[in-house]
Image (cartoon, rainbow, N blue to C red):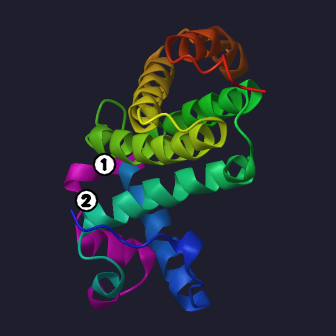
Amino acid sequence: MLSIQADSSVKLDPRVKRTRQLLIQALIDLMKEKGFQTISVQNLSERAGINRATFYAHFPDKFALLEYFIREGFQREIDERMLNACQFSLQNLRTLIIAVCEFVTKVHSNCVPSQNQYESLIESEIKNQVSGLMLKWLKQVGTDPSLELTATAVSWAIYGLASQWSHDKDRPAVEVFADQVLPMISANFNLALEIP
Protein backbone atom coordinates (compact mmCIF):
# COMPACT_ATOMS: atom_id res chain seq x y z
CA MET A 1 0.00 0.00 0.00
CA LEU A 2 1.40 3.37 -0.99
CA SER A 3 1.77 5.88 1.80
CA ILE A 4 0.70 9.46 1.16
CA GLN A 5 2.63 12.28 2.86
CA ALA A 6 0.84 13.74 5.86
CA ASP A 7 -0.86 17.09 5.28
CA SER A 8 0.06 18.38 8.71
CA SER A 9 3.67 18.98 7.69
CA VAL A 10 2.95 20.41 4.23
CA LYS A 11 0.98 23.52 3.27
CA LEU A 12 -1.57 22.34 0.71
CA ASP A 13 -3.31 24.38 -1.94
CA PRO A 14 -6.91 25.08 -0.86
CA ARG A 15 -8.21 23.25 -3.94
CA VAL A 16 -6.23 20.14 -3.00
CA LYS A 17 -7.60 20.31 0.55
CA ARG A 18 -11.15 20.73 -0.76
CA THR A 19 -10.85 17.79 -3.16
CA ARG A 20 -9.42 15.55 -0.45
CA GLN A 21 -12.21 16.58 1.92
CA LEU A 22 -14.79 15.72 -0.75
CA LEU A 23 -13.16 12.32 -1.22
CA ILE A 24 -13.04 11.65 2.51
CA GLN A 25 -16.72 12.56 2.89
CA ALA A 26 -17.57 10.32 -0.07
CA LEU A 27 -15.59 7.50 1.56
CA ILE A 28 -17.38 7.95 4.89
CA ASP A 29 -20.81 8.06 3.26
CA LEU A 30 -20.18 5.00 1.10
CA MET A 31 -18.70 2.97 3.98
CA LYS A 32 -21.86 3.60 5.98
CA GLU A 33 -23.98 2.44 3.04
CA LYS A 34 -22.19 -0.62 1.73
CA GLY A 35 -18.83 -1.37 3.32
CA PHE A 36 -15.31 -0.69 2.12
CA GLN A 37 -14.71 -3.82 0.05
CA THR A 38 -17.52 -3.06 -2.39
CA ILE A 39 -16.57 0.59 -2.93
CA SER A 40 -14.84 1.39 -6.21
CA VAL A 41 -12.81 4.41 -7.30
CA GLN A 42 -15.68 5.18 -9.66
CA ASN A 43 -18.14 5.20 -6.72
CA LEU A 44 -15.85 7.54 -4.77
CA SER A 45 -15.34 9.88 -7.71
CA GLU A 46 -19.03 10.10 -8.52
CA ARG A 47 -20.00 10.71 -4.88
CA ALA A 48 -17.32 13.40 -4.52
CA GLY A 49 -18.37 15.07 -7.77
CA ILE A 50 -14.97 14.70 -9.43
CA ASN A 51 -13.64 12.62 -12.30
CA ARG A 52 -11.50 9.51 -11.88
CA ALA A 53 -8.39 11.28 -13.21
CA THR A 54 -8.70 13.79 -10.37
CA PHE A 55 -9.02 10.95 -7.87
CA TYR A 56 -5.82 9.36 -9.22
CA ALA A 57 -4.03 12.71 -9.08
CA HIS A 58 -4.52 12.56 -5.30
CA PHE A 59 -4.44 8.84 -4.45
CA PRO A 60 -3.24 5.73 -6.30
CA ASP A 61 -6.20 3.65 -5.05
CA LYS A 62 -9.00 3.48 -2.51
CA PHE A 63 -6.68 1.92 0.08
CA ALA A 64 -4.40 4.97 -0.02
CA LEU A 65 -7.45 7.19 0.51
CA LEU A 66 -8.50 5.08 3.50
CA GLU A 67 -4.97 5.19 4.93
CA TYR A 68 -4.92 8.97 4.50
CA PHE A 69 -8.33 9.30 6.18
CA ILE A 70 -7.22 7.29 9.22
CA ARG A 71 -3.75 8.84 9.54
CA GLU A 72 -4.93 12.44 9.15
CA GLY A 73 -7.97 11.91 11.37
CA PHE A 74 -5.94 10.49 14.22
CA GLN A 75 -3.26 13.17 13.82
CA ARG A 76 -6.03 15.78 14.18
CA GLU A 77 -7.15 14.09 17.42
CA ILE A 78 -3.60 14.33 18.77
CA ASP A 79 -3.18 17.94 17.62
CA GLU A 80 -6.54 19.06 19.07
CA ARG A 81 -5.53 17.70 22.45
CA MET A 82 -2.08 19.33 22.15
CA LEU A 83 -0.42 15.99 22.95
CA ASN A 84 2.50 16.59 20.56
CA ALA A 85 3.42 19.68 22.57
CA CYS A 86 3.05 18.04 25.99
CA GLN A 87 5.53 16.68 28.46
CA PHE A 88 5.15 13.09 29.56
CA SER A 89 2.80 12.76 32.54
CA LEU A 90 0.16 10.35 33.77
CA GLN A 91 -2.52 12.91 32.90
CA ASN A 92 -1.22 13.16 29.32
CA LEU A 93 -1.07 9.37 29.09
CA ARG A 94 -4.71 9.27 30.27
CA THR A 95 -5.63 11.86 27.63
CA LEU A 96 -3.90 9.74 24.98
CA ILE A 97 -5.88 6.66 26.04
CA ILE A 98 -9.12 8.65 25.74
CA ALA A 99 -8.09 10.00 22.32
CA VAL A 100 -7.39 6.49 21.00
CA CYS A 101 -10.68 5.13 22.40
CA GLU A 102 -12.73 7.95 20.92
CA PHE A 103 -11.00 7.80 17.55
CA VAL A 104 -11.33 4.02 17.21
CA THR A 105 -15.02 4.27 18.08
CA LYS A 106 -15.54 7.10 15.60
CA VAL A 107 -13.86 5.15 12.79
CA HIS A 108 -15.88 2.03 13.60
CA SER A 109 -19.07 4.07 13.43
CA ASN A 110 -18.19 5.05 9.85
CA CYS A 111 -18.72 1.59 8.42
CA VAL A 112 -21.50 -0.86 7.81
CA PRO A 113 -21.98 -2.91 11.00
CA SER A 114 -20.09 -6.22 10.95
CA GLN A 115 -18.12 -5.15 7.86
CA ASN A 116 -15.07 -3.51 9.37
CA GLN A 117 -12.62 -4.96 6.84
CA TYR A 118 -9.99 -2.35 7.49
CA GLU A 119 -9.34 -3.03 11.19
CA SER A 120 -5.69 -3.91 10.55
CA LEU A 121 -5.08 -0.59 8.78
CA ILE A 122 -6.65 1.34 11.66
CA GLU A 123 -4.55 -0.65 14.10
CA SER A 124 -1.32 -0.11 12.18
CA GLU A 125 -1.79 3.65 11.73
CA ILE A 126 -2.80 4.31 15.34
CA LYS A 127 -0.08 2.11 16.83
CA ASN A 128 2.56 3.84 14.69
CA GLN A 129 1.48 7.30 15.77
CA VAL A 130 1.06 6.35 19.44
CA SER A 131 4.46 4.65 19.41
CA GLY A 132 6.10 7.75 17.92
CA LEU A 133 4.48 10.00 20.51
CA MET A 134 5.40 7.63 23.35
CA LEU A 135 9.01 7.49 22.16
CA LYS A 136 9.15 11.29 22.09
CA TRP A 137 7.75 11.44 25.62
CA LEU A 138 10.00 8.66 26.95
CA LYS A 139 13.11 10.36 25.56
CA GLN A 140 12.19 13.37 27.69
CA VAL A 141 12.55 11.30 30.87
CA GLY A 142 15.32 8.82 30.02
CA THR A 143 17.92 7.50 27.62
CA ASP A 144 17.52 3.76 28.13
CA PRO A 145 18.16 1.84 24.89
CA SER A 146 14.92 -0.10 25.41
CA LEU A 147 12.78 3.04 24.99
CA GLU A 148 11.71 2.00 21.49
CA LEU A 149 10.52 -1.37 22.78
CA THR A 150 8.68 0.32 25.62
CA ALA A 151 7.02 2.79 23.23
CA THR A 152 5.96 -0.09 20.97
CA ALA A 153 4.60 -2.14 23.87
CA VAL A 154 2.66 0.84 25.25
CA SER A 155 1.18 1.60 21.83
CA TRP A 156 0.05 -2.02 21.42
CA ALA A 157 -1.47 -2.05 24.91
CA ILE A 158 -3.32 1.23 24.42
CA TYR A 159 -4.65 0.25 21.00
CA GLY A 160 -5.68 -3.23 22.13
CA LEU A 161 -7.54 -1.91 25.15
CA ALA A 162 -9.19 0.86 23.10
CA SER A 163 -10.29 -1.62 20.45
CA GLN A 164 -11.75 -3.94 23.08
CA TRP A 165 -13.56 -1.01 24.72
CA SER A 166 -14.98 0.21 21.39
CA HIS A 167 -16.46 -3.23 20.63
CA ASP A 168 -17.95 -3.71 24.11
CA LYS A 169 -21.71 -3.14 24.06
CA ASP A 170 -21.84 -2.39 27.80
CA ARG A 171 -18.75 -0.23 27.91
CA PRO A 172 -18.23 2.35 30.65
CA ALA A 173 -17.76 6.03 29.84
CA VAL A 174 -14.41 6.65 28.17
CA GLU A 175 -13.11 8.66 31.15
CA VAL A 176 -14.00 5.83 33.54
CA PHE A 177 -12.33 3.31 31.24
CA ALA A 178 -9.19 5.46 30.99
CA ASP A 179 -9.02 5.64 34.79
CA GLN A 180 -9.38 1.84 34.97
CA VAL A 181 -6.61 1.02 32.49
CA LEU A 182 -4.13 3.80 33.29
CA PRO A 183 -2.68 2.00 36.33
CA MET A 184 -2.24 -1.19 34.29
CA ILE A 185 -0.44 0.57 31.47
CA SER A 186 1.77 2.67 33.71
CA ALA A 187 2.58 -0.23 36.08
CA ASN A 188 3.28 -2.78 33.38
CA PHE A 189 5.69 -0.48 31.60
CA ASN A 190 7.19 1.19 34.66
CA LEU A 191 6.03 4.56 33.39
CA ALA A 192 4.88 5.84 36.76
CA LEU A 193 8.38 5.66 38.25
CA GLU A 194 9.84 8.69 36.50
CA ILE A 195 6.79 10.67 35.46
CA PRO A 196 6.38 14.13 37.00
The kind of secondary structure element at disc 2 is: loop
Mark sitting on residue 34: 1
Q: Is residue 10 left or right of residue 179?
A: left
Q: Quick check: marks 1 and 2 in contact, CB under 8 Å? A: yes
Task: Please tell me whether residue 59 is drawn above or below residue 181 in the rendered image.
Answer: below
Name the one closer to the observer, 37 or 120: 120
The answer to whether residue 124 shows anywhere in this view is yes
Q: Residue at x 56, y 16 (%)?
A: 190
Q: Which residues are magenta?
A: 32-54
Give the labeled residue for mark 2: 39
The answer to whether residue 110 shows anywhere in this view is no
Q: Is residue 160 magenta?
A: no
Q: Quadrant of the N terminus?
A: bottom left
Mark sitting on residue 160: none
Q: How many residues crowd mark 1 within 10 Å: few (<14), some (14–19), many (20+)?
A: some
Q: What type is the residue that disc 2 sits on? A: Ile
- Mark earlier in primary sequence (1, 2): 1
Q: Residue at x 28, y 51 (%)?
A: 36
* Image spot of residue 143 (x, y percent): 54, 39
